[in-house]
Image (cartoon, rainbow, N blue to C red):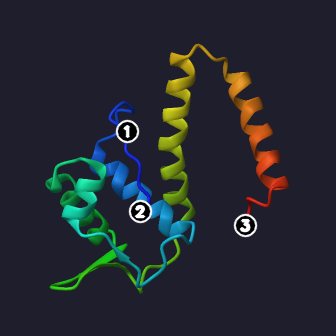
Amino acid sequence: MQIHISSNDGVPIYIQIVNQVKHLVASGRLLPGDEIPPIRALAEQLVVNPNTVARAYLELERAGAVIKRHGSGTYISEARAPMAQREKLKILAGRVDALLAEARHLDVDLADVVKMLRERDILMEKEGGRK
């Protein structure tokens, strides 16, 4: 499971973990029944406090995205309905906010960012990067 965190974007680390797991589920890269890493293993991989990962897993469990099987691990929920469009847009909004903040920091005009998005979208479509 590939998760990347950033301490510079202002989003709490546990929320970044939650959002990325939800994104992996929504994109089909994590499927119902897939096991996710143990708390300590993911904490070591991300170099964060295990309590941070535990909090993220608790939020995921409350949202119904994962289930804990005591003694055997944490798994993507079988009963998880496809992610609602609202949830998908919420995840993307965080990424858009980070992109806009970075563009402002680099003094890149919004029109240039939009142009780049369109160009990258066309490139991805040509490379077959769309579902």
In this picture, is 125 found above or below 121?
A: below
Q: How many marks?
A: 3
Q: Amino acid at mark 2?
A: Val
Spatial CA span between label 2 and label 3: 19 Å
Q: Amino acid at mark 1?
A: Ser
Residue 112 falls left or right of residue 84:
right
The residue nearer to you, when weighing 61 against 41, is 41
Q: Quadrant location of residue 78?
A: bottom left
Q: Secondary structure at mark 1?
A: loop
Q: Which residue is mark 3?
A: 131
Badge 3: few (under 14), some or many (20 or more) residues near its Cα, within 10 Å?
few
Q: Position of residue 31 (x, y in %)?
A: 49, 78
* Tag nearer the camera, 2 or 1: 1
* Residue under the point 41% across and 85% down: 33
Give whichever of discs 2 and 1 has the lower sequence position.
1
Residue 16 falls left or right of residue 32:
left
Q: Position of residue 30 (x, y in %)?
A: 48, 73
Residue 12 falls left or right of residue 131:
left
Determine which of the numbered discs, if any, sits on residue 106 in the image: none
The residue nearer to you, when weighing 63 against 98, is 98
* Residue under the point 25% across and 47% down: 47
Badge 2: few (under 14), some or many (20 or more) residues near its Cα, within 10 Å?
many
Determine which of the numbered discs, if any, sits on residue 6 in the image: 1
The quadrant of the picture occupied by the C terminus is: bottom right
Q: Position of residue 15 (x, y in %)?
A: 32, 50
Q: Which residue is mark 2?
A: 21
Q: Residue furthest top?
A: 107
Q: Quadrant location of residue 2?
A: bottom left
Q: Marks 2 and 1: CB-CB under 8 Å? A: no
Q: Amino acid at mark 3?
A: Lys
The residue nearer to you, when weighing 68 against 49, is 49
